[in-house]
Image (spheres, rainbow, N blue to C red):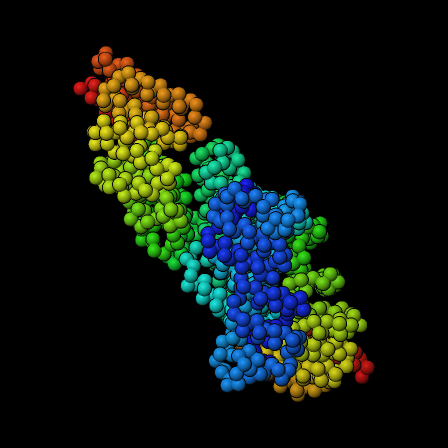
C-alpha cells in the first residue's frame, strides 16, 4: 500500500488539504461510493508518512470489506476510485488559486442561461477581482482578454451604446496583444537560453513586431513588457550594454509593480547576463552580479516560493563577493544564510564557502580544514572544491599534494558526465597550466614563464577567477 | 420569493441540474449551513414554475426558523447565501462540461507536487484525447500549449539530454503561435466588421507579421488559420475576388477538419463577403449568399454559439429571398424561425420581415400594417423602416406622405453621427432619387424618364435593392405613358 501512486500523492498533501479531501470524498456531489469513504478514513490515520507496518493492502481491505478473503482486483479498483477523487480535489484546489478562471466559468453559464442582469453583476465583480488582485502581467491580460470577450459575446446583438462596444473591442485587442508579448518573450527567452546550452537555432516568435512596438509605445503601466524585452535583448546581444542598463534601471524602478514570480525571473535574467560577461572574461560583471545578489537578498527575492536557497547560487554569491574584496559581508552572509541551504547540500556548500572565504583572506590552513570536511556529489560544486584544493596546496607549498590534487581534478573532468562542456574545458586548462607552472617553478626560467603568461592570457575559456589567480602566481615567481 | 434572482436562476436549471444542486448543497465540502439545505428543499418542491403560497418569504421563514416574527434581514442573508452556492454550483457545471480541458489544471498541481509518474500519465491521457480530435482549432491549440508548457516546466533542470529539451520548447512555441494567430484573426475580423458598420478605426493586430507567413503556406497544417485570414482579406479587399475564392476552397476542402463553432464563423464570413459584393453591384452574389444561408440553416450552424438566430442574419436572409423573389420559401422561413429570434428583438424583426414579404407580394396595405407595429430602437433598423415606409407610401400613391417622409429621413440622418459614411451616402441618394421619381410620377415624358432611368442605373451608392425597385417604377411609368 505504501508504494502506490495514491499514497505517494497523499504524502504531498498538507494537513488542511487532507481535511479538504475528506470533505470532498464524503460529498454526495462528488462521490456516492461508501467504500471509498471508508477506505480514506482507514488510510488517513497513517498520514503524513504512511509508513506503519500495519499499513498493508490486506489490512486495509479487512477494514473496508470485513473479514472476507483478500481480493486484489477489488482493492485496486477501490484505490483507483479514490485516486480519481484525489485528482478532482486537486482540480478544485487549483481553481481556488485561480479565481479569475472560476469567474469565467460562472459568466459562461450565466450567458448561456440568458441571465443578463446577473451576468452584468458578476462581470463587474470579475472585473474588480482582476483589477485589484492581479499584477499587469500574463495572467492578468489573458483573463482580461477572456473576460472582455465573454462580455462581447454576452451581447450578440450589440451594445446600446455604440462607443462602449468599440472601446470594448479595443480593450480586448490590447489585452490579447499584451498577453502575447509577455508569453512570446517568455518562450523566446527559454529558446535563447537553450541556444547557449546546445547546438540549436531558435525560431523566435513575433520578435520583430514586439521590438517595434516596444520602441514606439509607452508601457509605463505594464513595465514587465519592456523588462522582458530588454532582458532578452541583453542576453541575445551581449555586447549591447545599453539593454542591460535599461533593464536593470527599469527593474529597480518598477520592482513594486511586478509580481514576486516575475521579480525573480527578471533578476535571474540579469544575473545570467552577468554570468555571460564573467565567462567572457570581463571582470566588471562580477561586481554587477554582486550588486544584484545583494539586492535580491535584501528583498527576500530567493524565498518567495522557496524555503531554501539554491546550493550553487549560495556558493556563487560567496565566490563573487569575496573575489571583489567584500570579505566582511561574505562572512556575515555565510553565517546568516547557511541554514537556508537545503539540508542535503548544507554541509558541502557551507564548508566549500568557508573554504573559499578563508582562502581569499589568506588563512589557508582554515580553508583546508573546511575543504577536507567534504566530498561533494554535485558536479559543479565538486569541481569548485577540487580547484580550490589545488590552489590551497599551492599557497601552502605542499608540492606533492598539488600534483595529486591536479590529477584528481583531471580524473574528475574525464569521468564526470554531468559537467557542462564549458566548465569542463575551463577546468582542463586550469589543471594543465597549474602543472606546467609547477614544472617551471623550480627552474626559474623567466622567459618560459613570460611566454606561459601570454599563452594563458590569450585563452578565453579559462574562467576569470582562476585565470587571474594563475597569472598572479606566475608574476610572483618571476619577481 | 417569486421575483427574486435566485428563482429566476433556478428556473433555468434542468431536472438533472436541480438534482445535482441538491447533492451540492448537501456536500460539506461546499456548504455547512443546515438552513440552506432547508431553504432549498422547500424551493425545489415547486420546480419548475416556483409558483406557490408556500414560497412567500414569511411562510418559508416560519418553516426554517420555527418562529412567527418575520425578520427580513435574516431571510435576505439566507437567500443571498443560497445564491452564492448556486453560483459555485454553476462553476462546477461548467467544469463538468469541459471534459479533458479541466485536467490541464490537474497537470499544474501534479507538477508542483513533483508527481512525475502521475504527471506523465495525465499528460499522455490529454495528448491521446487531443490526438483523437478531428479539428485543430482554438481549443486544440490551447490545450496543447498549456500541456506542453507544463511538461517543459515539469523538468527544467532534470533533463539530462539537452537534445530532448529542444523539442519541448519548440512544441510550446509551435502551439502558442497557432493559438494566438487564431485568436488575433478573430479579433481582427470583429474589428473589421465593426469598421463597416459604424464610424470606427480599427488597429489590426500583427497583420503585417503574419501575412507573408500565411501566404507562404507556413500554416498549411492548420487550415483554420489561412481560412480565417483569407476571409478577413476578402472582406478588407472586396474587389479582390481571389481571396474569397481561396477561402471558399480551403473551407470546402477541409470541412471535416473545422470545428462546428468555426464552421459557423466562416459561414458568416462568406455571407458578409457576398453582401459586400452585392453592395458593389455584383448581382451574381445574391444566389451565392442565398446558398450559403441555406447551408447554414440546414446544418444548424447559426445555433452553435447562440441560443437565438441573430437578427442581422434573419434580416439578411429575408432581404436576399425578397430580391430573388423566393417568396414561398421566405414565408415558410419566417414562420419556422420567427420564434428562434431573441425575444427582445423578435417583434421588430418579424414585422419587418412580413412587411417586406407583403411588399414583394404587392400587398401594400398589409405591408404597411406590419411596419406600423414596429417601434425601432437601433439606428440601422429605424433607417430600414423609414426607407421601406417611403416605398410603400409611393406604391399606395400617397405622394404627399412620401415627401414628408423624405424630409423626416433627411432630418434623421443629419442628427445621426454614428452611421457609417457609406450608409449616409445611400440615404442621401435614396432621398434625391425618390423625390425625383415622385415628381416624375405627377408630370413626366418618355425622354425625362429614360434619362432618369440611366441616372438611377449609374447610382451604385443607392444599393442594388433600391436601384431595382426604382427602375421597376420608372418602367411602370414609361408603360403607363405608352398606354395613354
Farthest residue to the top: give it.
Answer: A443
Quarter assignment of residue A316:
top left
Quarter of the image with the C terminus of chain A in it? top left
Tell me: residue B414, above or below residue B144.
below
Residue furthest left in the image: A479
Residue B436 visible at all: no
In the image, A106 versus A147, the foreground residue is A106
Which residue is at 63% across, 47% downward? A75
Residue A6 can be seen in this image: yes
How many marks overall?
0
Residue A270 falls in image quadrant: top left
Please, is residue A57 above or below residue B345 in the view? above
Taking the view exactly as shown, the residue that stands out farthest to the front is A67
Q: Residue at x 74, y 85 (%)?
A: B365
Q: x, y (%) of residue B132?
A: 67, 47
Q: Residue B404, image x and y in percent? A: 62, 86
| Residue plotted at (53% across, 75% down) | B79
At x 49%, y 65%, the residue is A126
Whole-percent x, y for residue A372 in the image: 30, 27
Image spot of residue A474 (x, y percent): 24, 21
Q: Report the front residue among A211 and A122.
A: A122
Quadrant for residue B306, please give it: bottom right
- Where does the N terminus of chain A fall, quadrant-wise? top right
Q: Closest to the observer: B311 or B440?
A: B311
Amino acid at each position: 500500500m505504501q508504494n502506490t501512486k495514491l499514497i505517494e500523492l497523499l504524502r504531498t498533501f498538507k494537513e488542511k488539504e487532507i481535511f479538504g479531501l475528506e470533505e470532498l470524498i464524503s460529498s454526495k456531489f462528488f462521490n456516492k461510493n461508501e467504500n471509498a469513504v471508508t477506505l480514506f478514513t482507514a488510510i488517513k490515520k497513517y498520514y503524513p508518512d504512511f509508513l506503519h507496518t500495519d499499513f498493508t493492502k490486506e489490512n486495509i481491505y479487512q477494514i473496508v470489506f470485513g473479514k472476507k478473503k483478500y481480493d486484489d482486483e477489488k482493492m485496486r479498483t477501490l484505490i483507483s476510485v479514490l485516486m480519481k477523487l484525489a485528482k478532482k480535489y486537486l482540480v478544485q484546489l487549483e481553481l481556488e488559486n485561480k479565481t479569475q478562471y472560476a469567474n469565467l466559468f460562472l459568466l459562461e453559464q450565466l450567458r448561456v442561461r440568458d441571465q443578463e442582469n446577473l451576468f452584468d453583476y458578476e462581470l463587474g465583480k470579475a472585473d474588480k477581482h482582476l483589477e485589484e488582485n492581479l499584477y499587469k502581467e500574463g495572467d492578468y491580460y489573458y483573463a482580461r482578454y477572456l473576460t472582455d470577450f465573454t462580455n462581447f459575446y454576452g451581447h450578440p446583438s450589440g451594445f446600446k451604446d455604440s462607443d462602449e462596444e468599440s472601446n470594448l473591442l479595443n480593450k480586448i485587442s490590447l489585452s490579447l496583444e499584451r498577453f502575447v508579448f509577455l508569453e512570446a518573450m517568455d518562450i523566446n527567452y527559454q529558446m535563447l537560453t537553450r541556444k547557449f546550452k546546445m547546438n540549436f537555432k531558435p525560431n523566435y516568435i513575433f520578435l520583430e513586431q514586439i521590438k517595434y512596438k516596444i520602441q514606439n509605445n509607452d508601457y509605463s503601466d505594464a513595465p514587465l513588457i519592456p523588462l522582458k524585452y530588454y532582458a532578452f535583448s541583453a542576453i541575445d546581444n551581449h555586447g549591447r550594454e545599453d539593454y542591460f542598463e535599461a533593464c536593470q534601471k527599469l527593474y529597480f524602478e518598477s520592482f513594486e509593480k511586478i509580481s514576486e514570480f516575475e521579480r525573480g525571473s527578471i533578476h535571474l535574467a540579469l544575473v545570467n547576463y552577468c554570468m555571460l560577461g564573467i565567462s567572457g572574461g570581463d571582470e566588471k560583471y562580477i561586481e554587477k552580479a554582486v550588486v544584484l545578489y545583494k539586492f535580491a537578498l535584501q528583498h527576500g527575492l530567493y524565498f518567495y516560493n522557496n524555503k531554501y536557497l539554491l546550493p550553487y547560487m549560495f556558493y556563487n554569491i560567496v565566490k563573487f563577493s569575496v573575489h571583489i574584496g567584500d570579505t566582511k559581508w561574505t562572512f556575515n552572509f555565510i553565517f546568516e544564510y547557511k541554514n537556508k541551504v537545503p539540508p542535503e547540500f548544507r554541509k558541502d556548500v557551507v564548508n566549500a564557502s568557508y573554504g573559499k572565504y578563508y582562502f581569499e583572506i589568506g588563512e589557508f590552513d582554515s580553508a583546508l580544514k573546511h575543504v577536507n570536511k567534504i566530498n561533494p556529489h554535485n558536479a559543479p560544486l565538486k569541481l569548485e572544491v577540487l580547484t580550490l584544493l589545488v590552489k590551497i596546496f599551492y599557497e601552502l607549498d605542499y608540492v606533492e599534494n598539488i600534483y595529486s590534487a591536479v590529477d584528481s581534478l583531471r580524473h574528475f573532468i574525464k569521468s564526470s558526465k554531468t559537467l557542462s562542456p564549458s566548465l569542463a574545458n575551463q577546468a582542463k586548462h586550469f589543471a594543465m597550466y597549474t602543472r606546467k607552472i609547477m614544472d617551471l617553478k623550480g627552474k626559474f626560467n623567466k622567459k618560459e614563464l613570460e611566454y606561459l603568461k601570454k599563452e594563458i592570457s590569450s585563452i578565453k575559456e579559462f574562467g576569470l577567477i582562476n585565470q587571474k589567480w594563475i597569472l598572479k602566481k606566475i608574476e610572483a615567481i618571476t619577481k | 420569493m417569486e421575483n427574486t434572482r435566485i428563482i429566476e436562476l433556478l428556473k433555468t436549471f434542468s431536472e438533472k441540474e436541480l438534482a445535482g444542486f441538491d447533492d451540492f448543497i448537501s456536500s460539506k465540502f461546499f456548504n455547512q449551513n443546515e438552513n440552506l439545505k432547508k431553504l432549498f428543499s422547500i424551493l425545489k418542491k415547486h420546480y419548475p414554475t416556483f409558483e406557490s403560497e408556500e414560497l412567500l418569504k414569511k411562510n418559508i421563514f416560519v418553516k426554517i426558523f420555527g418562529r412567527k416574527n418575520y425578520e427580513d434581514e435574516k431571510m435576505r442573508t439566507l437567500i443571498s447565501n443560497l445564491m452564492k452556492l448556486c453560483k459555485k454550483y454553476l462553476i462546477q457545471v461548467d467544469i463538468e462540461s469541459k471534459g479533458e480541458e479541466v485536467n490541464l489544471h490537474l497537470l499544474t498541481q501534479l507538477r508542483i507536487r513533483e508527481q512525475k509518474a502521475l504527471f506523465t500519465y495525465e499528460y499522455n491521457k490529454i495528448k491521446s484525447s487531443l490526438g483523437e480530435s478531428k479539428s485543430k482549432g482554438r481549443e486544440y491549440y490551447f490545450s496543447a500549449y498549456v500541456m506542453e508548457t507544463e511538461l517543459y516546466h515539469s523538468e527544467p533542470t532534470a533533463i539530462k539530454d539537452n537534445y530532448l529539451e529542444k523539442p519541448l520548447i519548440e512544441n510550446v512555441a509551435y502551439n502558442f503561435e497557432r493559438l494566438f494567430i487564431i485568436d488575433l484573426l478573430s479579433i481582427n475580423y470583429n474589428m473589421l466588421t465593426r469598421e463597416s458598420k459604424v464610424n470606427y478605426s480599427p488597429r489590426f493586430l500583427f497583420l503585417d507579421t503574419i501575412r507573408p507567413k500565411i501566404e507562404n503556406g507556413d500554416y498549411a497544417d492548420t487550415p483554420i488559420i489561412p481560412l480565417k485570414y483569407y476571409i478577413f482579406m476578402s472582406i478588407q479587399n472586396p474587389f479582390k475576388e481571389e481571396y474569397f475564392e481561396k477561402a471558399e476552397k480551403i473551407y470546402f476542402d477541409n470541412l471535416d477538419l473545422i470545428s462546428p463553432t468555426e464552421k459557423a464563423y466562416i459561414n458568416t464570413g462568406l455571407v458578409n463577403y457576398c453582401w459586400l459584393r452585392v453592395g458593389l453591384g455584383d448581382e451574381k452574389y445574391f444566389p451565392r449568399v442565398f446558398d450559403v444561408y441555406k447551408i447554414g440553416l440546414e446544418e444548424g450552424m447559426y445555433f452553435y454559439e447562440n441560443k437565438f438566430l441573430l437578427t442581422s442574419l434573419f434580416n439578411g436572409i429575408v432581404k436576399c429571398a425578397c430580391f430573388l423573389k423566393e417568396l414561398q420559401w421566405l414565408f415558410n422561413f419566417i414562420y419556422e424561425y420567427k420564434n428562434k429570434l431573441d425575444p427582445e428583438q423578435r417583434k421588430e424583426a418579424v414585422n419587418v420581415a412580413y412587411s417586406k414579404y407583403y411588399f414583394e407580394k404587392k400587398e401594400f396595405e398589409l405591408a404597411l400594417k406590419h411596419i406600423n407595429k414596429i417601434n425601432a430602437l437601433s439606428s440601422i433598423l429605424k433607417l430600414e423602416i423609414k426607407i421601406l415606409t417611403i416605398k410603400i407610401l409611393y406604391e399606395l400613391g400617397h405622394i404627399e406622405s412620401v415627401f414628408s417622409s423624405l424630409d423626416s429621413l433627411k432630418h434623421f440622418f443629419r442628427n445621426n453621427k454614428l452611421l457609417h459614411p457609406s450608409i449616409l451616402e445611400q440615404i442621401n441618394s435614396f432621398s434625391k432619387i425618390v423625390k425625383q421619381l415622385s415628381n416624375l410620377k405627377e408630370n413626366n415624358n418618355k425622354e425625362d424618364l429614360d434619362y432618369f432611368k440611366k441616372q438611377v442605373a449609374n447610382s451604385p451608392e443607392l444599393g442594388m435593392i433600391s436601384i431595382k425597385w426604382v427602375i421597376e417604377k420608372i418602367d411602370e411609368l414609361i408603360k403607363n405613358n405608352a398606354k395613354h
